[in-house]
Amino acid sequence: DMRQWWRKAGREMSFPADGVSGATRAPGPQKLVFSGAKGALKGLKPGQYTLVVEAAREVGGHEAVRVPFSWGKPGKPASAKGSAELGTVTVAVK
């Protein structure tokens, strides 16, 4: 619950944050693109990371899908599949 998180921890955290949150998106495929050359990820060191995609309904289900991936050089896409709220999540480093 975003409101509960904000009351307990969000107000006190330092920025920039290491997460992205947004309003509800329509069902179906979604695509997010982050550039390693500029923006928030430009200083990210090569290594092993985990992308966490979380879906939470105000009155309903909650699910988090974790996708481990390697950052720093192009490689084979990594993916994981949700079981209720989320479908397949794929990370491709290009």
Image: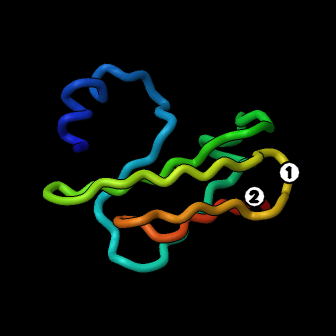
| Front residue of 25 and 84 | 84
Q: Are marks 1 and 2 in contact (CB under 8 Å)?
A: yes
Marks 1/2: CA–CA distance: 7 Å
Describe residue 35's horizontal placement relative to residue 24 as left or right. Answer: right
Label 2 SS: loop
Residue at image location 19% in from the left, 28% down from the top: 7
Residue 35 position, x and y percent, is: 68, 54
Pick out the residue farthest to the left: 59
Residue at image location 79% in from the left, 61% down from the top: 94
Disc 2: which residue:
93
Quarter assignment of residue 39: top right
Which amino acid type corresponds to the residue marked 1 in the rendered image?
A: Lys
Mark 1 residue crowding within 10 angstroms, few (<14) / some (14–19) / many (20+): few
Q: Earlier in the sequence, mark 1 or mark 2?
A: 1
Quarter assignment of residue 49: top right
Residue 57 position, x and y percent, is: 23, 58
Pick out the residue farthest to the bottom: 28
Residue 42 position, x and y percent, is: 71, 41
Disc 1: which residue:
73
Label at residue 90 = none
Describe residue 10's horizontal placement relative to residue 69 as left or right. Answer: left
Residue 31 position, x and y percent, is: 54, 70
Which amino acid type corresponds to the residue marked 2 in the rendered image?
A: Val
Residue at image location 71% in from the left, 34% down from the top: 43
In this figure, what is the number of numbered marks?
Answer: 2
Whether 57 is drawn above or below 30: the answer is above
Describe residue 69's horizontal placement relative to residue 7 as left or right. Answer: right
Describe residue 62's horizontal placement relative to residue 58 as left or right. Answer: right
